[in-house]
Amino acid sequence: MERYLLQQYMMNGVYICLILFCMYSDFKERKILNIITFPGMLAGLAFNFLLSGQKGIINAGIGISLGFVFLFIPYILHGIGAGDVKFLMMCGAFAGKNGIIIVFLAGSVLAAVFSIFRVILNGGIKGIFIAGTSIINKEFLKQKSDELGKNNTVPYGIPYGIGAIIQMIVFIYFGKGIS
């Protein structure tokens, strides 16, 4: 039991460090680095295997897949970057199939609030209407993002990182561990 708890604490520590690094990198550079997300996915798979054997690695694999599926359409529509997709996949490797749903829902709500706040600051109510209709017109969205530049993009790694921390707290509070 002590060994299991030690592994769980190590997993939580590694996961929180990866989350914080990705959040910082997305905020500072507007990039979430592959050198963090891919090894993070492998670490999540490995920890889940150590903690739960074959069931753990299957759970983590489903979490990775769901992380990809949840953000694939926003990525195709140029609403988010590939780093955000890989970050959610990494979260899925640690959080598993049930946890990634919490990460995605909490992160999406926070991202929506953050985006609306940002649009209001940059363009008022008219900006919200333009942002809402631009999802349909990906050329318009791409043109606007090119005009505004990197500094005006939304770092979605931050709300999804907060969503991952919320998921950890929920699972630890309710005694499920992390996945």
Image (tube, grey):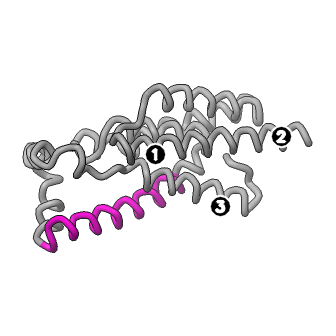
Q: Residue at x 76, y 35 (%)?
A: 52
Count of numbered circles on the image: 3
**Amino acid type, residue under disc 2 in the picture:** Leu
Gap in angstroms between the C-alphas marked 1 and 3? 23 Å
Horizontal side of residue 59 vs 51, given as left or right: left
Q: Position of residue 10 (x, y in %)?
A: 74, 39
Indicate which label's residue lies in the foreground, 2 or 3.
2
Reading the image, the residue beneath label 3 is: 170
Q: Are marks 2 and 3 in contact (CB under 8 Å)?
A: no
The answer to whether residue 112 is magenta is yes
For the N terminus, the quadrant is: top right
Q: Position of residue 46 (x, y in %)?
A: 67, 28
Res 13 quadrant in image:
top right
Q: Which residues are magenta?
A: 101-125
Reading the image, the residue beneath label 2 is: 6
Horizontal side of residue 30 vs 141, given as left or right: right
Reading the image, the residue beneath label 1 is: 24
Which of the two labelled residues, at mark 1 and mark 3, occupies the earlier sequence position? 1
Q: Position of residue 176 (x, y in %)?
A: 73, 54
Secondary structure beneath label 3: helix
